[in-house]
């Protein structure tokens, strides 16, 4: 275990130079207070959790002081936003402080979001509000606990620095960790500005730092693209299987590592709704829940286009075509597990689709359905769940087929429950839960956000005494409009 001052840095991205990022110092926020800390994220840096109580902790994560080895940089990138190309984006309010090397030899980017203006701020104030910082923190650590690849979050720091959104709010900072902050949009920037030598330099950096195995392949860039396609197929399969809606799948919000990245107006489904749109500025539903699959492929095509100076286009196209079958296989696999099935059967896809249609027409709670299904024998669970469905004939027919199908796999009830509970969370980050703890935090009470974070860090455990966090939303919490201003 290390103290905060013992961290070792190796700032590989900063060394790429000024064509890739700009040196900018953080602008501190006043009267910093630590809102919530992830001990699990601290462990990635080998930090002792008690370090969060030190005076210097809040100073570092509110931009008042820096490690001597840190080299804060704002990265340049571009990207497709809602389908249109925006030639110049970049870190408008976040800074890559540096890369920490942990005892396991892993590099972790320290990215301070809300750190003030940069050359990429455009009309923005360079700040992040407390509300959106808490939402990103909770989601990052919760998705990780669910087994869904994600950037991580170390802490949120609140302040009395005022910021103006739809109303006056206060500035906060979140310290994000990821093994890379390179987005699809980084490649697009160098491609569309026709700086193909720099595009190649970026590719070499990503290959050597993040995909070293691809260097041994006959065509390293093609192998890298394939790896990115595979990782994204896996990621989107998780999102769809667990009801996660990202909300702003612009190509600048897509990580080259295939992790969930740049949280905005995301939501987990309460009632199952394939057409759910979580971003209320998304008028056409481009990023609706079910569109996440074709949109991920669209974004991968945008990345492929940016790689055309490095790889032959037909090979890229062929690799891109792997996305859908890879996604489908992985999704089916995850859904089988959620249903407690061990083997695979040609009829499984149809069985799953029929269930989702029934859930959609009866507005059944997506997460609780699967948890409940594993709580007792299939017969008992189905009898209890039946009450949630309006199309009873449809449900009974499905339940009968499901019963037959699960009987094929054998095993005891205890085994079935244990394997289902290990993949079906009891606790899920519902928008109404996030809203409750944000309301308290905005009044200066951080106990609720800390408790919710603790519960959501062990989503598969029963956690007696905390059952209220597993409840469906109350009426007011069903249709919260999450502003995309953050
Ligand atoms: P996002 O919607 O958070 O993914 O951000 C899209 C782009 O806008 C990125 O280049 C951000 O850095 C930038 N941006 C978002 N909010 C702000 C802000 N308050 N100040 C400056 N830049 C911002
Ligand atoms: Mg973004």
Image: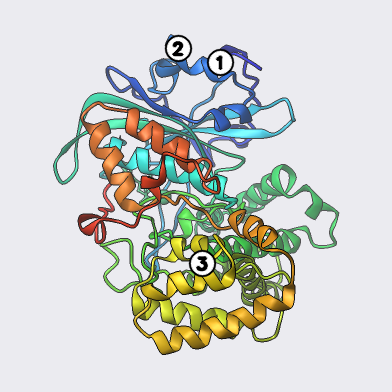
Where does the image place residue 105, in percent across and percent down from the top left?
A: 74, 30
> Mark 1 — residue?
4
Distance between the Cα atoms at labels 3 and 1? 38 Å
Quadrant including the N terminus: top right
Q: Is residue 311 visible?
A: yes
Q: What residue is rendered at 38% in x and 16% in y? A: 64
Question: Compared with residue 477, is residue 141 higher up or lower down, i.e. above or below?
Answer: above
Would you say the beta carbon of the disc 2 residue lies within 8 angstroms of ligand 1?
A: no
Q: Is residue 298 visible?
A: no
Q: What residue is rendered at 33% in x and 20% in y? A: 33
Scheme of colours in the image? rainbow
Quadrant including the C terminus: top left
> Mark 2 — residue?
56
Disc nearer the start of the sequence (1/2): 1
Question: Compared with residue 291, is residue 76 higher up or lower down, i.e. above or below?
Answer: above
Left or right relative to 308: residue 82: left
Check contact, mark 1 vs mark 2: CB within 8 A.
yes
Q: What residue is rendered at 59% in x and 85% in y? A: 401
Where does the image place residue 370, in percent across and percent down from the top left?
A: 51, 64
Residue 410 occupies which quadrant of the picture? Answer: bottom right
């Amino acid at each position: 275990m290390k103290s905060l001052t013992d961290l070792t840095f190796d700032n590989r991205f900063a060394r790429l130079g000024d064509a890739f990022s700009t040196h900018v110092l953080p602008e501190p926020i006043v009267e910093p207070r630590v809102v919530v800390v992830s001990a699990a994220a601290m462990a990635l840096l080998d930090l002792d959790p008690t370090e969060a109580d030190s005076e210097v902790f809040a100073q570092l994560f509110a931009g008042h002081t820096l490690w001597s080895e840190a080299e804060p940089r704002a990265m340049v990138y571009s990207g497709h936003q809602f389908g249109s190309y925006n030639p110049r984006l970049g870190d408008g309010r976040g800074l890559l402080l540096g890369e920490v090397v942990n005892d396991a030899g892993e590099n972790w980017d320290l990215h301070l979001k809300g750190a003030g203006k940069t050359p990429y701020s455009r009309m923005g104030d360079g700040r992040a509000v407390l509300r959106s910082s808490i939402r990103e923190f909770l989601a990052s650590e919760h998705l990780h606990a669910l087994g869904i690849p994600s950037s991580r979050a170390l802490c949120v720091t609140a302040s009395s620095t005022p910021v103006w959104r739809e109303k006056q709010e206060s500035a906060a900072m979140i310290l994000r960790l990821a093994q890379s902050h390179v987005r699809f949009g980084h490649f697009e920037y160098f491609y569309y500005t026709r700086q193909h030598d720099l595009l190649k330099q970026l590719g070499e950096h990503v290959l050597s730092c993040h995909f070293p195995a691809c260097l041994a392949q006959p065509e390293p860039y093609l192998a890298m693209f394939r790896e990115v396609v595979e990782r994204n197929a896996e990621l989107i399969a998780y999102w769809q299987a667990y009801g996660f809606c990202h909300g702003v799948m612009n190509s600048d919000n897509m990580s080259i590592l295939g992790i969930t990245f740049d949280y905005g107006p995301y939501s987990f489904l309460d009632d199952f709704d394939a057409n759910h749109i979580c971003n209320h500025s998304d008028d056409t539903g481009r990023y609706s829940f079910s569109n996440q699959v074709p949109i991920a492929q669209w974004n991968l095509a945008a990345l492929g286009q940016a790689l055309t100076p490095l790889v032959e286009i037909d090979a890229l196209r062929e690799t891109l075509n792997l996305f859908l079958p890879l996604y489908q296989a992985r999704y089916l696999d995850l859904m089988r597990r959620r249903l407690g099935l061990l083997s695979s059967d040609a009829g499984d896809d149809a069985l799953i689709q029929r269930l989702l249609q029934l859930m959609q027409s009866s507005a059944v709670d997506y997460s609780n359905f699967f948890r409940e299904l594993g709580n007792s024998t299939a017969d008992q669970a189905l009898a209890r769940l039946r009450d949630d469905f309006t199309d009873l004939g449809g449900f009974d027919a499905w339940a009968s087929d499901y019963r037959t199908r699960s009987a094929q796999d054998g095993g005891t009830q205890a085994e079935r429950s244990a394997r289902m509970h290990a993949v079906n969370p009891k606790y899920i980050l519902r928008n109404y839960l996030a809203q409750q703890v944000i309301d308290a935090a905005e009044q200066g009470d951080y106990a609720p956000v800390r408790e919710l974070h603790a519960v959501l860090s062990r989503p598969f455990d029963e956690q007696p005494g905390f059952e209220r966090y597993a409840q469906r939303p109350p009426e007011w919490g069903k249709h919260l409009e999450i502003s995309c201003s953050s």
